[in-house]
Image (tube, grey):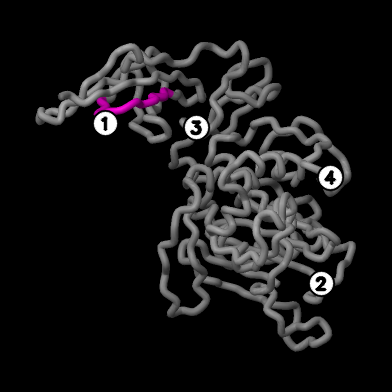
Amino acid sequence: AAMLVHVPSMEIRGLVGSADFFNHGIDGQVDGTAALRSPGSTLKPFIYALALDQGVIHPETLLNDDPAYFAEYRPTNFDGKFIGKISARDALVLSRNIPAITLNTKIKPDLYDFMQKAGADFPHDKSWYGLSIVLGGAEVEMRMMARLYAMLANGGRLQELRQLRDDKYEPGRQMLSPESALLAAQMIMHPAPDTLAFTHGSSLPVYWKTGTSSGFRDAWTAGIFGPYVLVVWTGHFDGHPNPSFIGVERAAPLFFEIARAVMAQERLVDTVGPALRARNVSFIDICTATGLPGNCRVTQKDWFIPGKSPIAASPGTAAGPKILSPRGGISYVASYQSAEKLRIPLQADAQQTDQLYWFDGTELIGAGDAKTPLLWSPSPGQHTVHLVNAAGQSSTEVVNVSAAE
């Protein structure tokens, strides 16, 4: 089964429900795009998107891929091995189970809650699935899978599919911040295996993830290229297994064959990369030894969401910006009797060329540089002001604002 969706319009441009509609031996009249199947690891990008959105990780955060017990459950990886320390990006691309399970225990909402909010109709409650939901224990339709991957490409906005020409276009609803959705998509951008030879003569990025269900009953590949989302599934409709049903071996070749066919007919351009760069993201130095922002002997550049991504700096990193105003030891007074609002200048001791981001809690006040202070009009109460530069370095002041009598 396969489905091709044009993301800007959410139109289903191609749908194949089975290999042969008239073959009764394979239940060919079953529409595989509407069948509930185990997704394997194809839902893992949404765990990482939630972790990005909740400030738990950035793409180069180091995670542990070591043997671990969760209550009485001791999961393993597909290859039966453990890697040890691994970046979040590599853990997602390589589909390591321990990092994904660990992240799912740290986020709220977690994958189950997120899927329910997205409209997944699970027949059981969260406790019934437990940690197995991370590994594909809760079945989903291909149509839902296509909507979720389109949501990443759409900057976190989940929309309905349009199958018929007269189907109304729905604006949808925001499920993730644009930065975390697009960055999660960017994390699954990786070259196709040489055996698929997809990249020959093409520079178009492909953002894709494979999945293999427990017992080798379902093989998946889902991804984004140009303005399209494509989802491919192979398996038996009666559920009997086949050891060759492995996502990268059975579904990925079909995925890239279809993608090549589309590219042969249309001139496609990347949509995820430009959309990500237009958002509140920075490209900063990450210390490879610690997975933390800052300078050390070996660094690499990667994306960072100012004000949201983890901001602890690597040991030895130069001091970050310092808040000069507002000051934590002063009580500011806001008067409702005056026509003029309280205006507190936001000033910092920082490099003149630094791009600075000011936050009231998690709400962005504004961005600028050290030369020109911003003016802030807070309401009465206690405020936690965060100052973050593009390298992820930060400082914080707790500010009290009282109302005039």
- Specify whether residue 290 is painted magenta: no
> Does the segment drawn in magenta span residue 380?
yes
First in sequence: mark 1 or mark 3? 3
Q: Main secondary structure of the magenta part?
A: strand
Identified by mark 1, the residue type is Ser
The residue that label 1 is drawn on is 379
Q: Which residue bears the numbered disc 2? A: 239
Q: 147 left or right of 71?
A: left
**Where is mark 3, residue-wise?**
282
Q: Amino acid at mark 2?
A: Gly
Nearer the observer: mark 2 or 3; the answer is: 2
Q: What amino acid type should be assigned to the residue bearing mark 4?
A: Thr
Element class at badge 3: strand
Check contact, mark 4 vs mark 3: CB within 8 A: no
| Left or right: 179 as drawn, with respect to 343 | right
At which x and y percent is residue 126?
A: 66, 55
Q: Residues under labels 2 and 3: Cα distance?
A: 45 Å
Residue at x 78%, y 64% (from the top left corner): 218
* N-terminal-most mark, 2 or 4: 4
For residue 172, above or below residue 163:
above
Q: Which amino acid type is marked by label 3?
A: Ser
Q: CA distance from mark 4 to mark 3?
A: 35 Å
Q: Nearer the viewer, mark 1 or mark 4?
A: 1
Residue with the mark numbered 4: 76
Q: Marks 1 and 2, Cα distance to the nearest angstrom?
A: 59 Å
Say which of marks 1 and 3 sits in front.
1
Crowd around label 3: few <14 · some 14–19 · many ≥20 (10 Å): some
Distance in Å between CA atoms under marks 1 and 3: 30 Å
Q: Earlier in the sequence, mark 4 or mark 3?
A: 4
**Which quadrant: the N terminus?**
bottom right
